[in-house]
Image: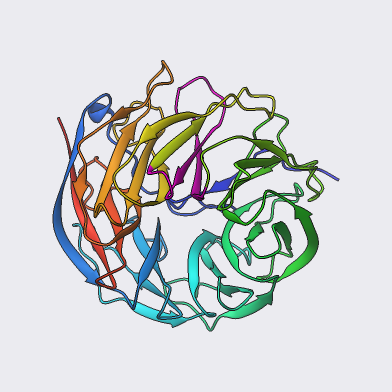
Amino acid sequence: MNRRRRLCIAVAGGLLLGGAPPAIPAVAADAAGCTPSYTLTGSAAADTNTRHVVTADLDGDGVPDVVAANLEGDSVTVLLGEGDGTFAAGGTYAVGTHPYQTVVADFDGDGHPDLATADFGGAQVSVLLNSGDGTFGPASAIDVSGSPRALATGDLNGDGLADLVVAEQQTSTVRVLLGDGDGTFTDAGQTATGSQPHGIVVGDFDGDGDADVATASVASAGVSVLLGDGTGALGTATKYAATARLYSLAEGDFDGDGSLDLATVSNGADTLDVLPGNGDGTFGAATAYSTPALPVAVGAADLDGDGTTDLLVSSLQGNTVTPYTGTASGALTQLTDVPATGAYDATAADLDGDGVRDLVVADSTGGQVDVFRGVCT
């Protein structure tokens, strides 16, 4: 069997696995090395208690769109981008109870990005298939164990199809759901991870071409790394110390050395921890950075166009989103806090086509998505 060795990862910025999605413009070359700043330019209604946002081109027009997960609305809201930083009237779709997070990938192989949510209150994953124009059919439910807090997508078994991994908080496990290519999934079972996983990512941490998984513990187990063998199976979790009460996890090359690193936030200590990857599946000791009060999410994106992954920390009590830019030295540079009411999550995409990524923020208090126009100087 010919195995596809190219690993595709879905992260907060909305990269897709499975099929060839329409391209979304990257940061302009002349913005490389700039210092980004952000100004609130508008908002779009979502539903009650918006907790997570992800961007992708859902209708194939080359413009980033937004999906918002609404915890207390038991729904996701799809906002189709107009190309000028505004959105057409959104469609809201019912999912399971208390969706915490959404990922985007082509689950049925038709070339259009689909959605999956982790339904924390309903012990299920909801899958919504794209009709091809940015509208979605009714959600189908996949039963998982109690309190699925987060999920990620990647090709775990090398068959070229989008799979899912689910962080099951109540059972302290990772569940692997192997994509069948038609929008359905085969349950490949659970693997133990650090206690009460509250964040999960997929990446090739050891450079062997197979997808690996990492989780962040909301208890005191730090970060766990589970290496994949290319068949969909995960190895025994290796645990790395970090600040207690981790609430979110992101991956990216934050120091530009070609290896994936991990970043996580503690809402118990107002701390951002960064664990440098060694490229062989192991990680160095965490370096801690202070954050505003009650950080609840960390996202990764290249904000300044220099090719090194940067970070966005959303702090609920601080009512801010804080950018941290990655550097070749490995040390992060903290930029000016962006005031953002009810900030529960943030991602970055060029919504207005000017070559600079803008910020999209989940405003949990307003039940809306706030847009901050990016400028690079």
**294 horizontally vs 189: left or right:** left
Q: Nearer the viewer, residue 274 or 348?
A: 274
Residue sticking out furthest to the right: 1
> Colour scheme used in the picture?
rainbow
Q: Is residue 281 above or below residue 125?
A: above
Q: Position of residue 162 (x, y in %)?
A: 65, 57
Quarter holding the C terminus is top left
Q: Nearer the viewer, residue 301 or 337?
A: 337
Highlighted magenta segment, given as a residue range: 245-270
Q: Is residue 260 magenta?
A: yes
Q: Is residue 246 magenta?
A: yes
Question: How many numbered circles does the render carry?
Answer: 0
Q: Which residue is found at the position 46% from the left and 80% from the top?
A: 74
Q: Which residue is found at the position 74% from the left and 39% from the top?
A: 227
Residue sticking out furthest to the top: 329
Q: Nearer the viewer, residue 269 or 302?
A: 269
Q: Position of residue 24 (x, y in %)?
A: 37, 49
Q: Position of residue 272 (x, y in %)?
A: 42, 38
**353 horizontally vs 112: left or right:** left
Q: Which residue is found at the position 59% from the left and 46% from the top?
A: 220
Q: Position of residue 268 (x, y in %)?
A: 43, 49
**166 horizontally vs 78: left or right:** right
Q: Is residue 297 above or below residue 281?
A: below
Q: Is residue 200 above or below residue 238?
A: below
Q: Is residue 248 above or below residue 42?
A: above
The quadrant where residue 63 appears: bottom left
**291 horizontally vs 300: left or right:** left
